[in-house]
Amino acid sequence: MEIIIAKRAGFCFGVKRAIDITFGMATKNKEGVFTIGPLIHNPQVIEKLKREGIFPLEMDDIENSGAKALIIRTHGIPCYLYDNISARGLKIIDATCPFVKKAQRYAKLLKENGYQVLILGDSNHPEVRGIMSYAGEDAIVMDENTPLPKLGSKVGIVVQTTQPVEALKKVLSNIIGHVKEVKVYNTICNSTALRLKETEDMASRVDVMIVVGGKNSANTTQLANLCRSLNVRTYHVETASEIQDKWLNKIKRVGITAGASTPNWIIKEVEKRIRDIGGKSFNGN
Amino acid sequence: MEIIIAKRAGFCFGVKRAIDITFGMATKNKEGVFTIGPLIHNPQVIEKLKREGIFPLEMDDIENSGAKALIIRTHGIPCYLYDNISARGLKIIDATCPFVKKAQRYAKLLKENGYQVLILGDSNHPEVRGIMSYAGEDAIVMDENTPLPKLGSKVGIVVQTTQPVEALKKVLSNIIGHVKEVKVYNTICNSTALRLKETEDMASRVDVMIVVGGKNSANTTQLANLCRSLNVRTYHVETASEIQDKWLNKIKRVGITAGASTPNWIIKEVEKRIRDIGGKSFNGN
């Protein structure tokens, strides 16, 4: 049985950076250091951080927590929370993904230059709530299926970094006939699109797909759903221990991919587990 | 037989303005006043202007023409020709359509702000050649079918005023995944789109369409082609005298539309001619 491992499986640039910053803190002065919410959507990593003494904390629970420093996760936070944290005398360790930071800056710039800001993304996503705080009171959040809202004559667009480019195309097509000036900052990060593309190619060449990552991870779930939609037998696992021998019975090729929040050591364990069942590893391309 | 006349038949805002300016000159000091090229694509109007003493002149023929003043037509001219004309000591009467003027100004602004300017339009059209002169050396002209050129990271778009919005949607969709920043000035004038839409609606309700305007008028020809594509019997005429009685034999409804360069007096003559054959007029809607 061949094992094909996706080249783009696991941490994206922004998550790797946030993890490095946070574990870096753990080796230093971790007394009173918390992350605002869980750092990433991966239970195993969160457990590992807890063992290192770094716990997630909700904003509402800061008061009696004894917190001295707060780590901001990749999604970023609304600008008014920076002031709130500073006003409490707490240190901020900012692990916001630099690509998300860029989207926040562009939203601010557009607003300052008189544009009505339109954010393409999921209004419930923390990244979008963060960007929104920089975008002014007349800002609008919409996704590709939102009916066309009433717009000013000068519209500026920023995009949640994980949106598909097709959504941006659709929104642009919908609004371009109704406005006189549109400025678009294409803040989509290619990482998600490239991972989906690689997974799609791989799924067409294997008998079984193992998708590794938090059950609460949206992008891992998206990878698993993509594989299922391509009619390949697919298993979404968080750890190697979930994998059953019978899944791989009499198959020729198995593919492994993983979400942006899945650490490499879990992918390695999954690979080892499959090799133990009888697989031989190859790198995907 | 009912006659239905399109509300939007004939001169658009920019053409009406240019005609008013030019005939205004004819009543004043017409000595040595020329238009650069034919003012509009309508032979009857050009003949009428000649009778008033105002002739078209090509730039190459200025030298020995005795010209004292030149009228710039709605399409506008490249910026370096203004200098050329001024250097000859000639007066400029600028009848450039204000919407075209806007596209020229935006192209200049985009260039000044560090954008690579992309002009969506027909590279052979005088309007586009004019806009191009303001857009900098790295500017690109493309239409909706042009393969994606190599682009900088900051792209600014202006559009030939008569382009369909669908072409802009297509070009935006093609480039948005390849650039980080796009600023679009939607300089499309709705006049063309609305006239086409009204003509399309009308064609579905009549037995015969009479499309009035210069045989050399691109937008009149476009109207006639649209009607033909809808399988309604269509005649493209320049004047009332071309209309034959047999065209309207035993029909219930005839529609009249006209291009942006067709003067009202010709449309009126066409209407009268059809009434004489046996029609009764109604305004289109």
Image (tube, coloured by chain):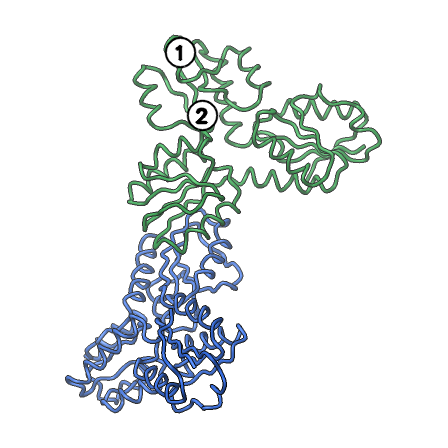
Chain colours: A green, B blue
Q: Position of residue B12 (x, y in %)?
A: 32, 72
Q: Residue at x 69, y 33 (%)?
A: A5
Residue B119 in the image: x percent, y percent? 41, 62
Nearer-N-terminus badge (1/2)? 1
Instruction: Let me know if residue A92 appears in the view.
Output: yes
The quarter of the picture where residue B88 lies is bottom left
User: Do marks 1 and 2 share a subunit?
Assistant: yes
Give the number of the disc on residue A67.
1
Q: Quadrant of residue B237?
A: bottom left
Q: Secondary structure at mark 1?
A: loop
Q: Is A187 positioned to the left or the right of B110 in the image?
A: right
Secondary structure at badge 2 equals: loop
The circle on residue A95 is 2
- At label 1, the amino acid type is Ala
Look at discs 1 and 2 and give the one toward the viewer.
Answer: 1
User: B118 or A196: nearer the eye?
Assistant: A196
Q: CA distance from mark 1 to mark 2?
A: 17 Å
